[in-house]
Amino acid sequence: MTSSFNNSKDQTFAHDFSVISKRFLTASTFVLRFTRNELRFRAGQHIIVGLKGEMDQREYSIYSSENDEYLEILVKEVKEGNISVKLKESRPGDLLQVNGPFGSFCLQPSDIRSGKFVFVATGTGISPFHSIVKSYHETDYMLIHGVRTSEEAYESDSFDKYRYILCTTQDRNSDHHGRVTTFLQKYSIAPGTMFMLCGNGGMIYEVYHILREKGVQPQDIISERYF
Ligand SMILES: Cc1cc2nc3c(=O)[nH]c(=O)nc-3n(C[C@H](O)[C@H](O)[C@H](O)COP(=O)(O)OP(=O)(O)OC[C@H]3O[C@@H](n4cnc5c(N)ncnc54)[C@H](O)[C@@H]3O)c2cc1C
Protein backbone atom coordinates (compact mmCIF):
# COMPACT_ATOMS: atom_id res chain seq x y z
CA MET A 1 0.00 0.00 0.00
CA THR A 2 1.37 3.42 -0.85
CA SER A 3 0.91 7.05 0.08
CA SER A 4 1.03 9.72 -2.56
CA PHE A 5 1.50 13.02 -0.74
CA ASN A 6 3.48 14.45 2.10
CA ASN A 7 1.48 15.57 5.12
CA SER A 8 0.39 19.19 4.98
CA LYS A 9 1.90 21.54 7.52
CA ASP A 10 -0.29 22.15 10.54
CA GLN A 11 -1.80 25.63 10.20
CA THR A 12 -2.18 28.35 12.78
CA PHE A 13 -5.67 29.85 13.00
CA ALA A 14 -6.68 33.37 13.91
CA HIS A 15 -10.20 32.47 15.03
CA ASP A 16 -11.93 29.74 16.99
CA PHE A 17 -13.75 26.89 15.30
CA SER A 18 -17.38 27.23 16.26
CA VAL A 19 -20.19 24.66 15.83
CA ILE A 20 -22.77 25.86 13.27
CA SER A 21 -25.16 22.91 13.14
CA LYS A 22 -25.59 19.18 13.49
CA ARG A 23 -27.76 16.97 11.29
CA PHE A 24 -28.59 13.42 12.25
CA LEU A 25 -28.50 10.78 9.50
CA THR A 26 -29.39 7.95 11.91
CA ALA A 27 -29.96 7.89 15.68
CA SER A 28 -26.21 7.55 16.25
CA THR A 29 -24.57 9.16 13.21
CA PHE A 30 -24.51 12.85 12.42
CA VAL A 31 -22.80 15.50 10.31
CA LEU A 32 -21.21 18.22 12.43
CA ARG A 33 -20.78 21.52 10.60
CA PHE A 34 -18.45 24.18 11.99
CA THR A 35 -16.62 27.30 10.87
CA ARG A 36 -13.77 26.69 8.45
CA ASN A 37 -11.55 29.46 9.73
CA GLU A 38 -9.66 29.51 6.39
CA LEU A 39 -8.32 26.00 6.93
CA ARG A 40 -6.84 24.73 3.66
CA PHE A 41 -7.08 21.00 2.97
CA ARG A 42 -7.14 18.45 0.18
CA ALA A 43 -10.21 16.26 -0.19
CA GLY A 44 -9.47 12.95 1.54
CA GLN A 45 -7.46 14.44 4.40
CA HIS A 46 -8.43 14.31 8.07
CA ILE A 47 -8.31 16.72 10.99
CA ILE A 48 -7.98 16.22 14.74
CA VAL A 49 -10.99 17.49 16.66
CA GLY A 50 -11.94 17.94 20.29
CA LEU A 51 -13.77 20.37 22.49
CA LYS A 52 -11.84 23.58 23.12
CA GLY A 53 -9.99 23.53 26.43
CA GLU A 54 -9.94 19.73 26.68
CA MET A 55 -6.86 17.58 26.08
CA ASP A 56 -8.57 14.63 24.41
CA GLN A 57 -9.03 14.77 20.62
CA ARG A 58 -9.69 12.30 17.78
CA GLU A 59 -9.09 12.09 14.06
CA TYR A 60 -12.00 12.71 11.68
CA SER A 61 -11.96 12.72 7.88
CA ILE A 62 -13.27 15.93 6.35
CA TYR A 63 -16.71 15.29 4.82
CA SER A 64 -17.29 18.68 3.20
CA SER A 65 -15.86 19.80 -0.13
CA GLU A 66 -12.68 21.80 -0.67
CA ASN A 67 -14.98 24.56 -1.99
CA ASP A 68 -17.42 24.83 0.93
CA GLU A 69 -17.22 27.84 3.24
CA TYR A 70 -17.65 25.58 6.29
CA LEU A 71 -16.11 22.30 7.48
CA GLU A 72 -18.12 19.14 8.06
CA ILE A 73 -17.25 15.79 9.62
CA LEU A 74 -19.40 12.64 9.64
CA VAL A 75 -19.34 11.09 13.11
CA LYS A 76 -20.71 7.83 14.45
CA GLU A 77 -21.25 7.80 18.17
CA VAL A 78 -19.23 5.01 19.76
CA LYS A 79 -21.03 3.77 22.86
CA GLU A 80 -18.71 4.16 25.87
CA GLY A 81 -16.54 6.40 23.67
CA ASN A 82 -15.33 9.80 24.79
CA ILE A 83 -15.07 12.32 21.97
CA SER A 84 -17.79 11.04 19.65
CA VAL A 85 -20.29 11.26 22.54
CA LYS A 86 -19.21 14.82 23.36
CA LEU A 87 -19.46 15.89 19.73
CA LYS A 88 -22.94 14.39 19.60
CA GLU A 89 -23.94 16.54 22.57
CA SER A 90 -22.35 19.72 21.18
CA ARG A 91 -24.57 22.68 20.34
CA PRO A 92 -24.35 25.59 17.91
CA GLY A 93 -21.85 28.13 19.25
CA ASP A 94 -19.74 25.56 21.14
CA LEU A 95 -16.02 25.96 20.44
CA LEU A 96 -13.85 23.19 19.04
CA GLN A 97 -10.12 22.58 19.01
CA VAL A 98 -9.09 21.62 15.45
CA ASN A 99 -5.62 20.68 14.20
CA GLY A 100 -4.49 19.68 10.75
CA PRO A 101 -5.10 18.82 8.06
CA PHE A 102 -3.17 15.57 8.01
CA GLY A 103 -2.77 12.60 5.72
CA SER A 104 -2.19 11.67 2.12
CA PHE A 105 -5.43 9.80 1.39
CA CYS A 106 -6.03 11.99 -1.66
CA LEU A 107 -6.22 11.76 -5.44
CA GLN A 108 -2.99 12.56 -7.28
CA PRO A 109 -3.59 15.85 -9.16
CA SER A 110 -2.58 14.15 -12.42
CA ASP A 111 -5.19 11.38 -11.88
CA ILE A 112 -8.19 13.57 -11.11
CA ARG A 113 -9.28 13.89 -14.75
CA SER A 114 -7.83 10.73 -16.24
CA GLY A 115 -7.74 8.15 -13.41
CA LYS A 116 -10.24 5.36 -12.84
CA PHE A 117 -10.99 4.69 -9.16
CA VAL A 118 -12.75 2.16 -7.00
CA PHE A 119 -13.51 3.50 -3.51
CA VAL A 120 -14.27 0.92 -0.83
CA ALA A 121 -15.75 2.14 2.46
CA THR A 122 -17.30 0.70 5.57
CA GLY A 123 -19.61 2.83 7.73
CA THR A 124 -18.39 6.41 8.19
CA GLY A 125 -15.39 5.50 6.01
CA ILE A 126 -17.51 6.98 3.24
CA SER A 127 -16.59 10.46 4.52
CA PRO A 128 -13.36 11.17 2.55
CA PHE A 129 -15.03 9.92 -0.64
CA HIS A 130 -17.91 12.34 -0.09
CA SER A 131 -15.36 15.18 0.09
CA ILE A 132 -13.49 13.93 -3.00
CA VAL A 133 -16.62 13.54 -5.16
CA LYS A 134 -18.05 16.89 -4.01
CA SER A 135 -14.70 18.60 -4.71
CA TYR A 136 -13.96 16.90 -8.05
CA HIS A 137 -17.19 16.29 -9.98
CA GLU A 138 -15.28 14.83 -12.92
CA THR A 139 -13.87 11.88 -10.91
CA ASP A 140 -14.36 8.51 -12.63
CA TYR A 141 -15.23 6.25 -9.69
CA MET A 142 -17.25 3.37 -8.34
CA LEU A 143 -18.02 3.53 -4.62
CA ILE A 144 -18.67 0.27 -2.78
CA HIS A 145 -20.15 1.03 0.65
CA GLY A 146 -20.56 -1.63 3.31
CA VAL A 147 -22.94 -1.13 6.24
CA ARG A 148 -25.25 -3.20 8.41
CA THR A 149 -28.60 -1.77 7.31
CA SER A 150 -29.69 0.42 4.43
CA GLU A 151 -30.48 3.34 6.76
CA GLU A 152 -26.69 3.71 7.09
CA ALA A 153 -26.33 4.64 3.40
CA TYR A 154 -25.33 8.09 4.65
CA GLU A 155 -26.49 10.77 2.16
CA SER A 156 -25.84 8.37 -0.70
CA ASP A 157 -27.77 10.70 -3.02
CA SER A 158 -24.58 12.82 -3.02
CA PHE A 159 -23.16 10.18 -5.35
CA ASP A 160 -24.12 9.28 -8.89
CA LYS A 161 -26.60 6.40 -8.43
CA TYR A 162 -24.85 4.38 -11.15
CA ARG A 163 -21.55 4.71 -9.30
CA TYR A 164 -22.74 3.80 -5.79
CA ILE A 165 -23.07 0.18 -4.68
CA LEU A 166 -24.61 -0.41 -1.27
CA CYS A 167 -23.70 -3.67 0.50
CA THR A 168 -25.75 -4.53 3.59
CA THR A 169 -25.34 -7.48 5.93
CA GLN A 170 -28.54 -7.17 7.99
CA ASP A 171 -31.23 -6.28 5.47
CA ARG A 172 -31.77 -6.82 1.76
CA ASN A 173 -32.69 -3.28 0.80
CA SER A 174 -29.42 -2.81 -1.10
CA ASP A 175 -27.48 -3.66 -4.25
CA HIS A 176 -25.67 -6.55 -2.59
CA HIS A 177 -26.68 -8.58 0.45
CA GLY A 178 -23.37 -9.28 2.16
CA ARG A 179 -20.07 -7.62 2.93
CA VAL A 180 -17.96 -5.54 0.57
CA THR A 181 -15.52 -8.47 0.45
CA THR A 182 -18.06 -10.88 -1.06
CA PHE A 183 -19.06 -8.22 -3.57
CA LEU A 184 -15.44 -7.61 -4.57
CA GLN A 185 -14.69 -11.30 -5.00
CA LYS A 186 -17.07 -11.31 -7.99
CA TYR A 187 -16.16 -7.85 -9.27
CA SER A 188 -14.17 -7.67 -12.51
CA ILE A 189 -11.44 -5.08 -12.41
CA ALA A 190 -10.63 -2.89 -15.40
CA PRO A 191 -6.89 -2.54 -16.05
CA GLY A 192 -5.35 0.60 -14.55
CA THR A 193 -7.97 0.97 -11.79
CA MET A 194 -6.73 2.55 -8.55
CA PHE A 195 -8.24 1.51 -5.23
CA MET A 196 -8.82 3.60 -2.11
CA LEU A 197 -9.98 1.75 1.02
CA CYS A 198 -11.37 3.46 4.13
CA GLY A 199 -12.88 2.13 7.34
CA ASN A 200 -12.12 -0.58 9.85
CA GLY A 201 -8.81 -2.43 9.79
CA GLY A 202 -10.33 -5.87 9.25
CA MET A 203 -12.03 -4.80 6.02
CA ILE A 204 -8.87 -3.09 4.75
CA TYR A 205 -6.76 -6.19 5.41
CA GLU A 206 -9.23 -8.54 3.69
CA VAL A 207 -9.87 -6.29 0.69
CA TYR A 208 -6.15 -5.72 0.20
CA HIS A 209 -5.60 -9.48 -0.08
CA ILE A 210 -8.56 -9.99 -2.42
CA LEU A 211 -7.22 -7.26 -4.69
CA ARG A 212 -3.69 -8.68 -4.67
CA GLU A 213 -5.08 -12.10 -5.60
CA LYS A 214 -6.88 -10.43 -8.50
CA GLY A 215 -3.54 -9.01 -9.69
CA VAL A 216 -3.84 -5.40 -8.44
CA GLN A 217 -0.37 -4.00 -7.69
CA PRO A 218 0.39 -2.60 -4.19
CA GLN A 219 1.10 0.87 -5.60
CA ASP A 220 -2.48 0.98 -6.90
CA ILE A 221 -4.00 0.51 -3.42
CA ILE A 222 -4.06 3.19 -0.70
CA SER A 223 -5.91 3.00 2.58
CA GLU A 224 -7.09 4.96 5.63
CA ARG A 225 -7.72 2.88 8.77
CA TYR A 226 -10.17 4.29 11.34
CA PHE A 227 -9.88 1.67 14.11
C1 LIG B 1 -7.44 8.85 10.18
C2 LIG B 1 -8.74 8.60 10.94
C3 LIG B 1 -9.92 9.16 10.47
C4 LIG B 1 -11.13 8.93 11.15
N1 LIG B 1 -12.28 9.46 10.64
C5 LIG B 1 -13.45 9.20 11.26
C6 LIG B 1 -14.67 9.71 10.70
O1 LIG B 1 -14.68 10.41 9.66
N2 LIG B 1 -15.84 9.44 11.37
C7 LIG B 1 -15.85 8.68 12.54
O2 LIG B 1 -16.95 8.47 13.09
N3 LIG B 1 -14.71 8.18 13.06
C8 LIG B 1 -13.52 8.44 12.47
N4 LIG B 1 -12.36 7.95 13.02
C9 LIG B 1 -12.45 7.29 14.35
C10 LIG B 1 -12.37 8.40 15.44
O3 LIG B 1 -11.07 8.98 15.43
C11 LIG B 1 -12.60 7.87 16.85
O4 LIG B 1 -11.82 6.73 17.07
C12 LIG B 1 -14.07 7.52 17.13
O5 LIG B 1 -14.91 8.66 16.94
C13 LIG B 1 -14.23 7.02 18.57
O6 LIG B 1 -13.73 8.00 19.44
P1 LIG B 1 -14.28 8.10 20.94
O7 LIG B 1 -13.41 9.04 21.70
O8 LIG B 1 -15.74 8.35 20.98
O9 LIG B 1 -14.08 6.62 21.49
P2 LIG B 1 -12.78 6.03 22.17
O10 LIG B 1 -12.94 6.13 23.62
O11 LIG B 1 -11.56 6.60 21.56
O12 LIG B 1 -12.84 4.54 21.59
C14 LIG B 1 -13.67 3.52 22.01
C15 LIG B 1 -13.40 2.26 21.14
O13 LIG B 1 -14.17 2.34 19.93
C16 LIG B 1 -13.40 1.93 18.80
N5 LIG B 1 -13.96 2.60 17.61
C17 LIG B 1 -13.54 3.75 17.03
N6 LIG B 1 -14.33 4.08 15.98
C18 LIG B 1 -15.28 3.11 15.91
C19 LIG B 1 -16.38 2.88 15.06
N7 LIG B 1 -16.70 3.70 14.04
N8 LIG B 1 -17.16 1.79 15.28
C20 LIG B 1 -16.88 0.94 16.29
N9 LIG B 1 -15.84 1.11 17.14
C21 LIG B 1 -15.05 2.16 16.95
C22 LIG B 1 -11.99 2.31 19.17
O14 LIG B 1 -11.06 1.50 18.47
C23 LIG B 1 -11.95 2.04 20.68
O15 LIG B 1 -11.65 0.68 20.91
C24 LIG B 1 -11.15 8.14 12.34
C25 LIG B 1 -9.95 7.58 12.82
C26 LIG B 1 -8.77 7.80 12.12
C27 LIG B 1 -7.49 7.16 12.66
Image (tube, helix red, strand yellow):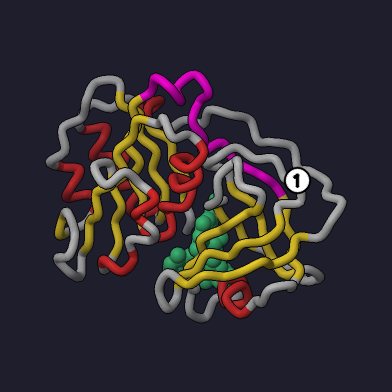
Which of the 4 image quadrants contains residue 50? bottom right
Q: Is residue 179 left or right of residue 143?
A: left
Residue 84 at x, y percent in the picture: 57, 71
Q: Is residue 61 left or right of residue 20?
A: left
Residue holding disc 1:
38
* Mark 1 residue crowding within 10 angstroms, few (<14) / some (14–19) / many (20+): some
Asked whether 41 falls inside the magenta stretch, the response is no
Amino acid under label 1?
Glu
Which of the 4 image quadrants contains residue 104? top right
Q: In the image, is residue 174 above or below residue 82?
A: above
Which of the 4 image quadrants contains residue 18? bottom right
Q: In the image, is residue 13 above or below residue 188?
A: below
Residue 135 at x, y percent in the picture: 52, 38
Q: Residue at x 35, y 54 (%)?
A: 157
Who is closer to the viewer here, 211 or 87?
87
Who is closer to the viewer here, 202 or 165?
165
Residue 162 at x, y percent in the picture: 24, 42
Q: Quadrant of the N terminus?
A: top left
Q: Secondary structure at mark 1?
A: loop
Q: In the image, is the residue at mark 1 within 8 Å of ligand 1 by its beta carbon?
A: no
Q: Residue at x 31, y 43 (%)?
A: 160
Q: Main secondary structure of the magenta part?
A: loop
Q: Is residue 21 left or right of residue 29?
A: right
Q: Residue at x 55, y 50 (%)?
A: 64
Magenta segment: 100-115
Asked whether 104 falls inside the magenta stretch, the response is yes
